[in-house]
Image: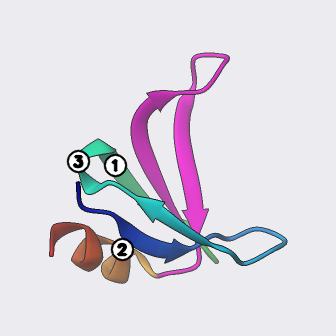
Amino acid sequence: MKLVSFHYAGPNETLIFINPEHVVAVRRFPNTTHIYVSALQNHGGPSYYPVRETIDDVVKRLIS
């Protein structure tokens, strides 16, 4: 399993590790990039992780 590290865009900028095989979409926002994964939240909505990296950097890391 390959894991890619990103800086979580929250109150504590901790590192999170995401398996690229579970990523279904990436979306740019003004100050963050959201990485959507295949697992659903409790209410059935999409699960995502807001990260500090740019969308270009996120895509580059996920496909490398």
The residue at which mark 3 appears reads as: 21
The residue at which mark 2 appears reads as: 58
10 Å crowding of disc 3: few (<14), some (14-19), many (20+): few
Amino acid type indicated by mark 3? Glu
Picture layout, residue 9 above or below residue 24:
below
Picture layout, residue 48 above or below residue 6:
above
Chief secondary structure of the magenta portion: strand
Q: What residue occupies the far right of the structure in this picture?
A: 11
Residue 30, percent from left and from top = 61, 74
Residue 6, percent from left and from top = 49, 74
Residue drawn at point x = 45 percent, y = 30 percent: 39
Looking at the image, is mark 3 or mark 2 earlier in the sequence?
A: 3
Viewer-closest of 63 and 5: 5
Looking at the image, is mark 1 or mark 2 earlier in the sequence?
A: 1
The residues tagged by marks 3 and 2 sit, at their Cα atoms, a distance apart of 14 Å
Magenta highlight range: 33-53
The residues tagged by marks 1 and 2 sit, at their Cα atoms, a distance apart of 11 Å
Viewer-closest of 2 and 24: 2
The residue at which mark 1 appears reads as: 25
**Image-based side of 50 in relation to 46, left or right:** right
The residues tagged by marks 1 and 3 sit, at their Cα atoms, a distance apart of 11 Å
Residue 49, percent from left and from top = 56, 55
